[in-house]
Amino acid sequence: MESRTRPVDFLICIWTALVATLVYLPLICGALASLSKGRYFSFPVRAYTSDWWSRTFDSIEITMIVENSLIIAAIVTVASVLIAFFGALAFARYEWKGRSLFQRLVLLPIFFPQPVLGLALLLWFNALGIQTSWVTAIIAHLVWIVPVVTLVIAIQVYSFDPILEEAAYDLGCTRLQVLREVTLPLLWPGVWSGGLFAFLLSWSNFPLSLYTAGADSTIPKWLYSKMVAGYTPMVPALGTMSTLGAAAVMLLGAIVMFVLRQRRAT
Amino acid sequence: MVTAPTSLEIQDEASARAGLLARFMRMSSGLRCSLPVLVLLGLGFIAPLIAIFAFSFAPPRTFNVFGTFSLANYATLFDPQNTVWMSFLWSVGFAFATAAILAAIAYPIAYGLNHVFGRWSSLVSILFVFPLFVSENVRLYGWVLFFIKSGVLDGTLKAMGGEGGPAVLYHSGTILGGMIYTYLPFMLFPMTLGLAMVPNDLVDAARDLGANRFQIWKEVELPLAMPGLLVGTLLTFVLGIGAVAEAKILGGQSIIVISHDIEIAFTYSQNWPLGSAMAVLVTIFVGTLTLLVLKRLDLDQLLGRR
């Protein structure tokens, strides 16, 4: 069935290529704007310069914002993988009374508009008298990212045979040993991709950070404030850098996954 | 004598702790594992929603939740003199159009990922996943640079000796385009999962029995892929209801969508009760829809295929 090429297949390829081009077109526009010499962007670009890039690198303000984004993303990654690992076991591994209710509860934050969630959290933090800062932004990110990571790990859990755990118990392993020697090694591809998702989604999150980070800024939040007022080519420069950073993390994650999988297979 | 009560207290505390531990150990494994998630979502998702619900009944422009009960905020929402219902209609309209158009755009790609691209499938998937990891304002701003005066489109057309690009920024159609652009992955991947649930044998059998291409699509593919299509449509619709970055960046605030109205109420005009009432309206709308659809789905089958 796969071998014969129909004219329809050709059309599908063309369509996919067209859509993919449109998906990446704005990113290319941003890269062009960050490399063009003038204060205001005009196309065709008359002169190229890397000035805006080096200025962005040298800016103390931007260094602080990048640090904020990194710290938030790192903490969100660790916390969400820990919470979601057990959440995924409850989601997919165990048969228990509240399971189907739990599955729906986990999905609800994903099926909820993030700006509205961010604003509801803003009111909630204010009502509790908590000053919003990067700490509250972490909590907001977790509310959305933990369910996503739970799903990612749960997909791995579905393909996992619980008999293996039971066999280990029968052979006299303790609960901790089973977790360390059987469950974790079998589930790590899901855990690893869940961690990647957590980091990248937190790194790029805009609506939740906008409303719940208070006076602290993250990369997307800072970019937005400059887009609204005070454009300089440092805006597309930082935008392009953060895009390339995300691409590098994703690539690295995929390579580690591939290498470890090869090693396990041999 | 002095030490006796303290040791008793310690004992009490110890036994209370032991009681908690015993209760924890008596829980089913599933419940025990779900606890961290339950605590997080209870405090970070359910509680804020209860808070906005409580605030929505406070008198307008006050922070007085307890003691007074007022329906004034809801009266404001449904007052035709006001623009809030307009914002809500804009959001619903945009969301509806986004979901419908995305279904048409994503279907051929989802089909291709399952049947045409073969070993290139994972590469194509990664190509479409990656934009999720670039924040939407960066991607939308790229479109501003494309469409803006003397931007990429305008400049190219002028360089070719033309009139220059059309002024498309700050129009409702451009906002819609931005939303379609932002939410593409949320339609594509559930749809791909859904189409993967259609067994090839069934399609072949239908063909052998004399069904034509359209009949196969309507009678076999569509019903079997429905869970995935449903999730994709619901997800894009629901996220579209709350979308605000598109209207702000591409629409230049010429159209106020509902999330923007809520933001204004919570920040500039410091009218928490009114903002809460709007947020409650969105929550009820979105929540009812989501729960209705989720009730019909077998999540184990969609995610696990076992």
Image (spheres, coloured by chain):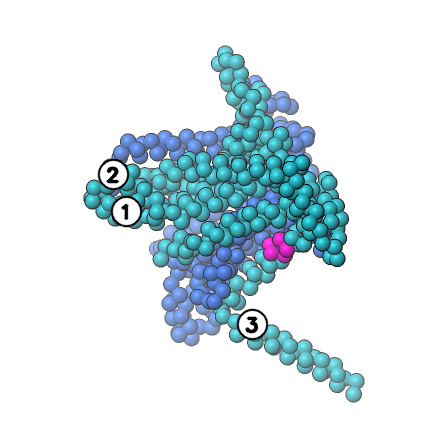
Chain colours: A blue, B cyan
Q: Earlier in the sequence, mark 1 or mark 2?
A: 1
Inter-mark Cα distance, 1 to 2: 15 Å
Disc 2 chain ID = B
Left/right placement of residue A217 relative to residue A182 reads right
Badges 1 and 3: C-beta atoms under 8 Å apart?
A: no
Inter-mark Cα distance, 1 to 3: 47 Å
Q: Residue at x 39, y 55 (%)?
A: B301
Tell me, yes or no, if residue A223 can be seen here.
no
Instruction: Give the mark toward the camera: 1 or 2.
Output: 2
* Residue wearing tag 1: B200
Q: What stretch is highlighted in magenta?
A: B45-50
Q: Which amino acid does label 3 sit on?
A: Phe
Q: Above or below — where is A128 with respect to A247? A: below
Few, some or many C-alpha atoms within 10 Å of disc 3 (few <14, some 14-19, many ≥20)?
A: few
Badges 1 and 2: C-beta atoms under 8 Å apart?
A: no
Tell me, yes or no, if residue A87 can be seen here.
yes
Q: Which amino acid does label 2 sit on?
A: Asn
Instruction: Give the mark toward the camera: 3 or 2.
Output: 2
Q: Above or below — where is B5 with respect to B43? A: below
Which disc is residue B212 wearing? Answer: 2
Q: Label 3, secondary structure: give it.
A: helix
Q: Which residue is drawn at 35% across and 40% down?
A: B111
Few, some or many C-alpha atoms within 10 Å of disc 1 (few <14, some 14-19, many ≥20)?
A: few
Residue B31 percent across, percent down from the top left: 51, 66
Which disc is residue B24 wearing? Answer: 3
Q: What residue type is labelled 1?
A: Asn
